[in-house]
Image: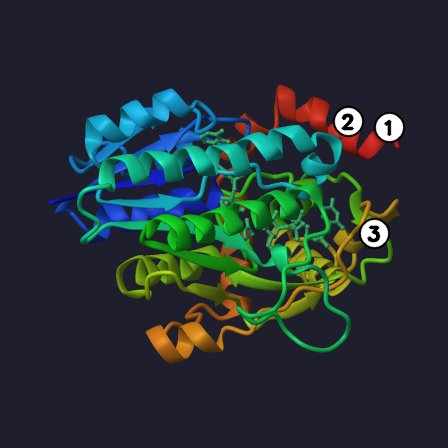
Amino acid sequence: MKTILITGGAGFIGSHVVRLFVIKYPDYKIVNLDKLTYAGNLANLTDIENLPNYTFEKGDITDGPWIQQLFDKYRFDGVVHLAAESHVDRSISNPMEFIMTNIVGTVNLLNAARAIWSNDLSGKRFYHISTDEVYGSLGDEGKFLETTPYDPRSPYSASKASSDHLVRAYFHTFHLPVVISNCSNNYGPFQFPEKLVPLFINNIRTNKPLPVYGKGENVRDWLYVEDHAKAIDLIFHKGTEGETYNIGGNNEWQNIQLIQKLCEIMDQKLGRTPGESAKLITYVKDRAGHDLRYAIDATKIKNELGWEPTIKFTEGFEATVDWYLQNEEWMVNITSGDYQKYYEQQYVKR
Ligand code: NAD
Ligand code: DAU
């Protein structure tokens, strides 16, 4: 029986990872630690919350003494660390939250793992989930490799880069058994509707403008979230200690092309005349420091661990649209209250 801590398990990717681990490993005890910030939502986990190998702990990774108590209580064998402030736009308006959670929070977890594992590191693993944004911005050519020098350019990516460096430092200095992965943009069910895909689905559904930053020329590499969760499972169990793995969809889209595609699908799903949803497209002031292009070279994880995306983009994207349309209540519940204030500040008072 292994006891595994998953941080940020009430968020978008974390909820898919928790679900996968709880169902696939009934002999593991899975502890989900989450602060339940605006982005954390236990409604993402209602289907598995009563399973006997699942436990939820509400807490803040910036609270070092509390984290240490949690590790003393459960004596975790492994950590899968996803908890983070994750939205680039929020990092521009409020960088300090990102420094605290993404950097200080990660160090608290590293220290707590080090303290309880100090006598016996065998079978232990600290897995830090990171992003391709640490590598900076690409031009028209090339892709990010694991060896690409770090060049973070937003407070979000700088805080993630910093946490990656600290995780590596604990490996080299203290021999903590770590592994890291850096993934491209995820899409799929349960993503908070401040990120491009769910935000635009919701705006099309409710006939609101679609705020495209700049000229919509920026490129992202999109991966279905369940494929990311499968890669995380593989790296956690089979990845080599001290190594980094890049994870990507090999699926680049210019924002405006992705949005046009989304509008076409939404027209079909909502029985609208072709072209109707695209009329909502509105070009707005660009994101400050907006990275032009991200693209992942995922050769290493393919060659070493045999991972490749399994969900074709056309299928995953349509399934994602269907999920948001069928789960209107989920969307309505989280797009009230504080979210409304954020939305007004971000898009109206420019
Ligand atoms: P998310 O914002 O949906 O979820 C983050 C979760 O962390 C939430 O449940 C939140 O409540 C929790 N959290 C935040 N601060 C906390 C704190 N101080 N203490 C405890 N819990 C806290 O994020 P996501 O999109 O699911 O991303 C998860 C991880 O994956 C992040 O580390 C992110 O950097 C990384 N990542 C995301 C993507 C993507 O496309 N979304 C791609 C690559 C990597
Ligand atoms: O690359 C991985 C990263 O992907 C993760 O590390 C981040 O946690 C995740 O949020 C995501 O970052 P992005 O900034 O790429 O995602 P976002 O959904 O915010 O934006 C995607 C693209 O769409 C980006 O080029 C900005 C643009 N955009 C976004 C929003 C919210 C718009 O044009 N309009 C918008 O309203």
| Quadrant of the frame with the C terminus | top right
Q: Position of residue 202 (x, y in %)?
A: 64, 41
Q: Is residue 79 left or right of residue 280?
A: left
Q: For numbered disc 2, what is the local secondary structure?
A: helix
Q: Amino acid at mark 1?
A: Lys
Cα distance in 3D space between marks 2 and 3: 21 Å
> Which residue is label 3 attached to?
279
Q: Is residue 71 visible?
A: yes
Q: Secondary structure at mark 3?
A: helix
Q: Tell which circle, 1 or 3, labels the residue nearer the N-terminal end.
A: 3
Query: Mark 1 and 2 residues: CB-CB less than 8 Å, in contact?
Result: yes
Residue, x 23% and y 48% (percent of image)? 23
> Label 3 sits on what residue type?
Lys
Could you give the CA–CA distance between mark 1 and mark 2, rounded to whole angstroms?
A: 7 Å
Mark 1 lies on a secondary structure that is: loop
Dot label at residue 344 = 2
For residue 98, above or below residue 138 = above
The relative height of residue 207 versus residue 165 in the rendered view (above or below) is above
Residue type, mark 2 in image: Glu
| Residue 280 spot, x, y in % from top left | 81, 47
Q: Residue at x 71, y 56 (%)?
A: 263
Residue lying furthest bottom in this view?
Answer: 303
Taking 319 as reference, is 133 left or right? right
How many residues crowd mark 2 within 10 Å: few (<14), some (14–19), many (20+)?
few
Residue that numbered label 1 is attached to: 349
Q: Mark on residue 305?
A: none
Q: Percent position (x, y) of residue 297?
A: 55, 74
